[in-house]
Amino acid sequence: MANSYPRRDQARGIWKINNITKNIKEDGTYPQNAGQLGLFAGGGTPSEVNTIQSIIPATAGNAVDFGDLRRTEGNFGGFGNFTRAVFGGGEPATNILEYVHFASLGNAADFGDLSVARGAVKGNANDTRGLMAGGEEPSLSNVIDFVTISTLGNATDFGNLTVSRSMLATGETSSPSRALYAGGNEPAMSNVIDFVQYSTTANAVDFGNLTVGRGSGFAASASATRAIYMGGGNPDATTNVIDYVEIGSLGNAIDFGDLTQSRTRSAGVGNSLRGMCGGGALEPNIYDIIDFVTITTRANATDFGDLLTATTLLTSASNGHGGLEEFLPRSPELYSPTGTVVPNGFGQGDIGVYNGGEAPGSTNVIEFIQISTIGGSQDFGDLTSANAIGGAVSNSTRYVTIGDNTDTLDTHYLEFKTKGNTAFFGDLTVRGWAGAGGSNSTRGINYGRANPATSGTANETIDYITTATIGNWTDFGNCNVASYFNGGTNSSTRMVKCGGITEGPNTITDSMEYVTIGSTGNGTDFGDLVASNGGFSCGNVSNGTRGIFGGGSVNPANNTNTNVIQYITIASTSNTTDFGDLTVARRYSGSSCNSTRGVWAGGENPSNSNTMDYVTIASTGNAIDYGDLAINVSRHGGASNGHGGLS
């Protein structure tokens, strides 16, 4: 990983000891050993115990003693972030929460209380929040409550599961944005999988189903993208089945492989690569077995080692599971050496992101740049699935993909402040790809698109989202001239769509039209592109006052691409004015900008390119070489956290 702690060859200005200390202890960008411990706690042997034992997920071996819980307990919940593990609930029903520090061997201390006393709860966490869900009080519960892990205190109501149940899968199953809850007793064994978004306080939503109903507590683990469920059943009839789901999408579980031994009442821990299933029972036997799988594969489990003693109804927590951000918790490149967050929004945001595309087949790569510098791109993370011909909208904190060639309604999002993979956002109102994206601080707009039902035709739909709120898109209105492979630029109040393909693969338009972002309605004529240059598949940037269109194709039938850059004043309807030329004529490029600079990345002429070039938006003139993308790519999306639509 890149360094954000002091280096003599890169430091600027005067370093203060308190800044370095804060960076190491609080901001998390100083090198640390992430994901080094998995903890198993409590349970029965068959009598209940207070033992906490640890393993190192990256290294096979037997568990060792870590410390003790404050009470002898079984059938309770646990979760962890980078620094703390928290355990709560238990039978008979209790509201006790207690915690340990991963970095220090020792006994648990008081954390606070659950909002409702109950046992058989399920824990999940990301960097910030820990959630406890379901349980028995003694009747079945649908309660979800949460704590802020860094702050001791009582839990607060979060929402409810879709179905009241207890003894769900044990082990963290999260991405940084989403927590999953699977199976359990209701009282029959359940196959239900629910999910919630950590950033909200709301009821759970249906995700899909396990391959088989299972309860009585069973093991689970996850990377940031995949959750696995291991074993389960009831004490007399267990399974060795392992199945999995992709956390960022919705759908039913898929067979993964088998455990070494059928059992239930086990617990799961893991890091981003491995998932472990520890302990459990198949009456009259209780096991000390720890199995493991590699989460990215689909194969049977392998022996990892043994618990200190055969244990059932235990719980678990780790500091390397999929709910935790990869870079502890930040992407260092986006932050100053002292750990101070680089500001976002218009006039301050400086991160440009490019997603997916053809390279030459569809790719899931996400890259980013710091727009004000010059140089190559860096890896940001991965799309949920490889795609091309998609776009993007953004506000100062969130980037949302729009449309792609997978013929799906799905859109996905990421957060600028952290590296990582995308998660599901919501569904478009109408399928389609190659629409124009525009956004301000509140809304994102998808303007027009190709009609997947009829090849080579355009769809007139305009739809929108409230970018800060995860959910489905809403109808906005219709295009004045329906087109796809069009461009979009915007101020904080107005979005302008330019050009595109209209009725067939060789028919392009030079028309421009606009909508007022804060309202709803149909597009209104704005003016025309100059001589149709860049009328098809151009890249677009803006500083809130001026919108710029660069490159594209003037004749898609024979790959006649252009290097022309032209601009408009967004507040005034008119035709475009010549700005200058790109360094290389091309179409299908991605684009991003801050308040002063616009960058075009990649594109096709006729093969895919890794070229990046830039202009100063407020001036006119030819583009200047910026650097290179990591891959040759075209037909990809781009946006930033500092474009002209933001405040």
Image: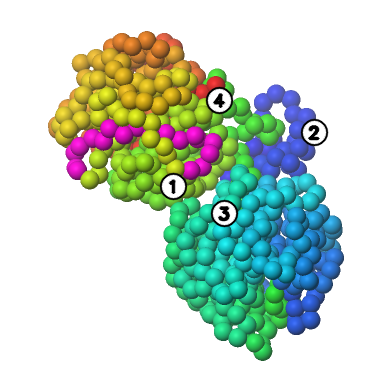
Reading the image, the residue beneath label 2 is 18
Specify whether residue 459 is painted magenta: yes
Q: Nearer the viewer, residue 542 or 296?
A: 542
Specify whether residue 570 is painted magenta: no
Residue drawn at (44%, 43%) of the image = 472
Which comes before the other along the chain, label 4 or label 2? Answer: 2
Q: CA distance from mark 4 to mark 2?
A: 28 Å
Which comes before the other along the chain, label 1 or label 4? Answer: 4
Residue type at the position of mark 4: Gly
Left or right of residue 427: residue 647: right
Residue type at the position of mark 2: Asn
| Magenta span | 454-471
The residue mark sitting in front, 4 or 2, is 4
Reading the image, the residue beneath label 4 is 345
Tell me if residue 338 comes above or below residue 242 in the rendering: above
Q: CA distance from mark 2 to mark 3?
A: 42 Å
Instruction: Say if mark 1 contacts mark 3, CB within 8 Å.
Output: no
Which comes before the other along the chain, label 4 or label 3? Answer: 3
Reading the image, the residue beneath label 3 is 204
Which comes before the other along the chain, label 1 or label 3? Answer: 3
Residue 124 falls in image quadrant? bottom right
Q: CA distance from mark 1 to mark 3?
A: 24 Å
